[in-house]
Image (cartoon, grey):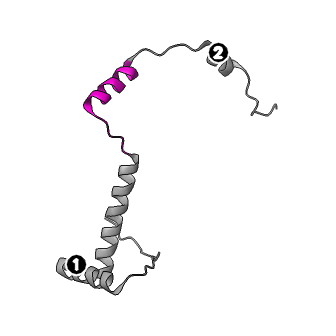
Amino acid sequence: MPATTKSDRLDLRLTTAQKREIEQAAAISGRSVSDFSVTALVEKAEDTIRREREIAMSRRSFEAFSALLDRPAKSVDKLAGLLARPSIFVEDE
């Protein structure tokens, strides 16, 4: 894996107790405070983003949803007509 240059910074304000706890956890892990903190923050960020994008549903709901997706598409005549018209957003040449 190629080395990545770290040039960005993130400044944080902590209480003395928070800083001490992070330093202790980093020491127990045998890592620097910076490495420990960045890893923890990135893992938490990835988890937060994943949970925001994830769709969770019961098996029954998923089966009902899948059944709807598997049904043949219906023709919507007015929509077909609309799509057949020239776009008002395209300039004439």
Residue 7's tag is none
Q: Secondary structure at mark 1?
A: helix
Residue 10, x across and y down, in percent: 45, 76
Q: Is residue 24 visible?
A: yes
* Earlier sequence position, callout 2 versus callout 1: 1
Q: Mark 1 highlights which residue?
A: 25
Residue 52, x across and y down, in percent: 40, 50
Q: CA distance from mark 2 to mark 1?
A: 63 Å
Neighbourhood count class around disc 1 (C-alpha, 10 Å): few under 14, some 14–19, many 20 upward: some
Q: Nearer the viewer, residue 5 or 51?
A: 51
Residue located 19% across and 80% down the image: 30
Residue 49, x across and y down, in percent: 39, 54
Q: Please say whether residue 62 is one of the residues in the magenta stretch.
A: yes
Neighbourhood count class around disc 2 (C-alpha, 10 Å): few under 14, some 14–19, many 20 upward: few
Task: Write the start and end of the magenta stretch as one range.
Answer: 54-70
Q: Amino acid at mark 1?
A: Ala
Residue 3, placed above or below residue 44? below
Residue located 40% across and 16% down the image: 71
Q: Nearer the viewer, residue 62 or 81?
A: 62
Q: Nearer the viewer, residue 67 or 32?
A: 67
Q: Mark 2 highlights which residue?
A: 78
Residue 44, placed above or below residue 49? below
Residue located 25% across and 31% down the image: 59
Q: Please say whether residue 23 is one of the residues in the magenta stretch.
A: no
Residue 14, x across and y down, in percent: 39, 81
Say which quarter of the image contains residue 46. Answer: bottom left
Q: How many marks?
A: 2
Residue 12 in the figure: left or right of residue 75: left
Decide whether the magenta segment is chiefly helix, strand or loop: helix
